[in-house]
Amino acid sequence: MANDVQHHPERSRYELYVDGRLAGVADYQVQGEALVFPHTEIDPRLRGQGLGAVLVRGALDDVRASGRTIVARCWYVAQFVDEHPEYADLVR
């Protein structure tokens, strides 16, 4: 299974593709130098495979590379950061 996280700033979201098909999204809003993540979603048929973590990790790695911070309003993004302290420095 090939996973690919893509940033689509024109849609204000990150998209996860699995074998070339859209499998999930992480929506955000820009707030100054921070990205506010209010919602993430994985296709219900693909849940339980760790794809949410793949999506959020890809998004947060991209945020880090851009020099921005995040506000985790989505429970899943907040939980991911709590469970992966290497991303705690991104939280505004």
Image (cartoon, rainbow, N blue to C red):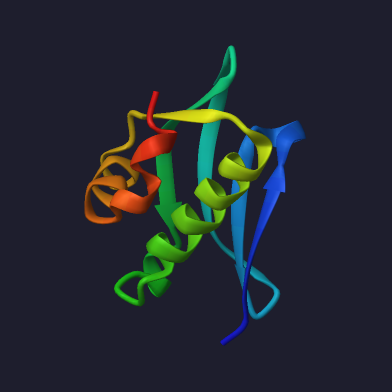
Q: Residue furthest right?
A: 10
Residue at horizontal 57%, vertical 42%? 64
On screen, residue 57 above or below 46: above
Toward the bottom, the furthest residue is 1
In this view, the residue in front, 87 or 38, is: 87
When the figure is inspected, residue 17 is found, relative to residue 39, above or below; the finding is below
Left or right: 88, with 37 as reference point: left
> In the depicted view, which residue is nearer to us: 35 or 61?
61
Placement of the N terminus among the 4 image quadrants: bottom right
Q: How many marks?
A: 0
Task: Answer above or below: position of 39 versus 45.
Answer: above
What residue sits 70% from the left and 75% below the top? 20
Give the side of residue 25 with respect to residue 48, left or right: right
Residue 5 on image: x %, y %: 62, 60
Location of residue 61 in the rendering, given as x and y in whole percent from the top left corner: 56, 51
User: Percent position (x, y) of residue 36?
Assistant: 47, 26
Among the 4 quarters of the image, the one containing residue 47: bottom left
Question: In front here: 10 or 68?
Answer: 68
Q: Name which quarter of the figure residue 45 lies in.
A: bottom left
Quadrant of image for the C terminus? top left
Q: Residue sitting at 29 percent across and 50 percent down? A: 85
Residue at 64% x, 32% y is: 12
